Amino acid sequence: MCGIVGYVGEKQALQVVVEGLRRLEYRGYDSAGVAVVADGVLDTRKKAGKLVNLETLLGADPLPQSTIGIGHTRWATHGGPTDANAHPHVSEDGKVAVIHNGIIENFAELRAELSAAGVTLSSETDTEVVAHLLAAVLPTVRMDLAEAMRTVCRRLSGAFTLVAVHSDVPDVVVGARRNSPLVVGRGQGENFLASDVAAFIAHTRSAIELGQDQVVELRRDSVVVTDFEGAPADVTEYEVTWDASAAEKGGYETFMAKEIAEQPKAVSDTLLGRIGPTGRLQLDEMRLSENDLREIDKVVVIACGTAYHAGLVAKYALEHWTRVPCEVELASEFRYRDPVVGPRTLILAISQSGETMDTIMALRYAREQGSKVLAICNTQGSTIPRESDAVLYTHAGPEVAVASTKAFLTQLVACYLVALYVAQVRGNKFGDEIAAVVRELKDMPQKVDLVLDTTEEMKALAEELKDAPSVLFIGRHVGFPVALEGALKLKELAYMHAEGFAAGELKHGPIALLEEGVPVICIVPSPAGRSVLHEKIVSNIQEVRARGARTIVIAEEGDESVVPYADHLVRIPACPTLLQPLVSTVPLQVFAAAMAAAKGHDVDQPRNLAKSVTVE
Ligand code: M6R
């Protein structure tokens, strides 16, 4: 939530900053703003709405040339999406500009204190207090902006990434981090600060992770990191492994279309190097000992949104393969209900961004109870893997569209790998049984590729159904989380009523929603192996059709039993039921994106949302 960019170097700062904001716009698009310092004068421009509005303003009212600047793209928390609430916020003397991601929880008290001291606040945000506090502290610390930032940060509570510039110190950008993401990009004669490496990857791949409660002082040729007390801090440097083109649309109309198409590769990359020649899994990289895995008596998955749906699939796989009980909980609920976890509980924290605040708070709570946390994450160096005992990275590459697609499929793969690995370590399954599943898993990238052939068909279906008032999704077993995921995609992209149900639950209430022509998307498991499950859902399809619903049936190639009950039949490649979400989800992603496009919505940046949710 909120994208932040800072630059100091030799280039035109405004260009670097606006380009960075373009790559971070997925984090929020309620407003955008920039500040530069030129000839000892601070100047800002900011505008409500998407970045393009700011660019128009900059065209009409240009900023002076400068080699130092900061920029912000906002997801509103405190104060509506107006020009006045857009960042940067500036001190009364016009010398300090501040941008912020997160929530300053004690802002009301600080606002009251500033008002009492005669300061006029000109926005409704929590951020503005920081600009005024910095201005007040600076003269007491010999105009040392980093020291002023440390002093102010010690007074703040909540989550914040802050970046500031001051017109009297025109060669310094200062950043601070508590709970929200901030990375340094180290260049030659230039340095960058950003919420995500995507903002500076076109300039440098050399990055530094900032830790909790750290302040960084950036000049053209130096990066100095301290804690909030001013003591030098240890930092981790790393090379970003993907290049700028990975975060470009590459000829696709939307990032989401590109990311859907990238799924076969993302699945294959996530399997890469993790399966030995005999089919044994090699997950030593996780940093969790075999002994730890033998000791656990329960797994609890914590995650949000799409990652939560991956967790629901993980439960079926884990319990089936390992016989270890598994609970799945929304991270935002887990933390506040006094859950029963302890040293023998393995927590699986699933997150694409690694910065989701609900998940961070849940994992911190679990660690306080003595549980070990294994993160499944797509973002190297982000908070969730940093604060976990172990991590298994998904290798989806950067996911820019707000709606998660390739991250979901790779989270599923990582969950299967973890479940099979636990079974291998604990001896719940014979080696050859594990090897057989692993062989099937290795075939999945090709099957995901095949299912992309349904793209045109799903687009045509979306066009036909675009005026439907609501769409329902039903599934059983792992088809149930797929139904939930299909409905979530449709809600977030097409802004329409959509709900996913466990097919067996329909008759306990939701079937009353059905009337003539309501589209019901039915996810049918493989008829092979689990024939009872298959028979049950075929009955459920008949039940909804008997009540006038229009059935859109997603079933395996060769499954003829569903043909009489399908108003529209979407074919997916045959695969074991547990692995089926890897293919059955894909047509639903395409359907939701096409529905959004048919309704004229922005597919990559749906309203009210942001890619990574860094506030609770
Ligand atoms: O970065 P995370 O995986 O922790 O994000 C969790 C959810 O916010 C995310 O999956 C969200 O539900 C997606 N927009 C859904 O498409």
Image (cartoon, helix red, strand yellow):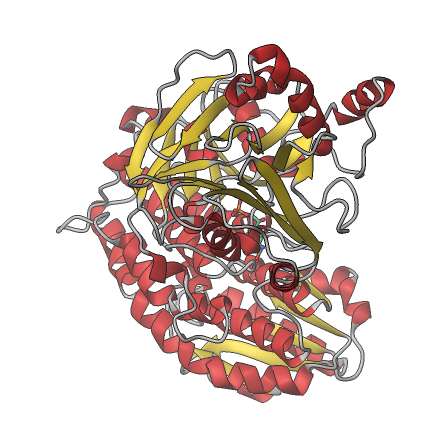
Determine the image quadrant of residue 565: bottom right
- Does residue 212 appear in this view? no
Res. 117 visible in picture: yes
Residue, far left: 277
Q: Residue at x 31, y 55 (%)?
A: 243
In percent of width and height, residue 571 lies at 46, 81
Horizontal and vertical percent for residue 214? Answer: 48, 22
Point out the residue furthest to the front here. 39
Q: Is residue 246 left or right of residue 460?
A: left
Task: Please report the residue visible at 36 percent of the width from the left and 33 percent of the height from the top.
Answer: 208
- Picture coordinates of residue 28 (x, y %)? 62, 52
Q: In the rendered image, which quarter contains the C terminus?
A: top right
Residue at left offset 78%, top offset 75%: 469
**Looking at the image, which is closer to me, 541 or 236?**
236
* Total numbered labels placed on residues in the image: 0
Q: Quadrant of the N terminus?
A: top right
Residue 241 position (above or below residue 510): above
Across and down, in percent, residue 315 comes to 49, 46
Q: Considering only vertical position in the picture, is 268 above or below 143? A: below
Looking at the image, residue 342 sits to the left or right of residue 547; the answer is left
* Direction from residue 187 to residue 49 in the image, left or right: right
The residue closer to the viewer here, 227 or 573, is 227
Residue 511's place in the image compared with 323, above or below, is below
Whether residue 259 is situated above or below residue 229 in the rendered picture: below
User: At x 31% / y 46%, what residue is drawn?
Assistant: 205
Report the front residue among 537 and 581. 581
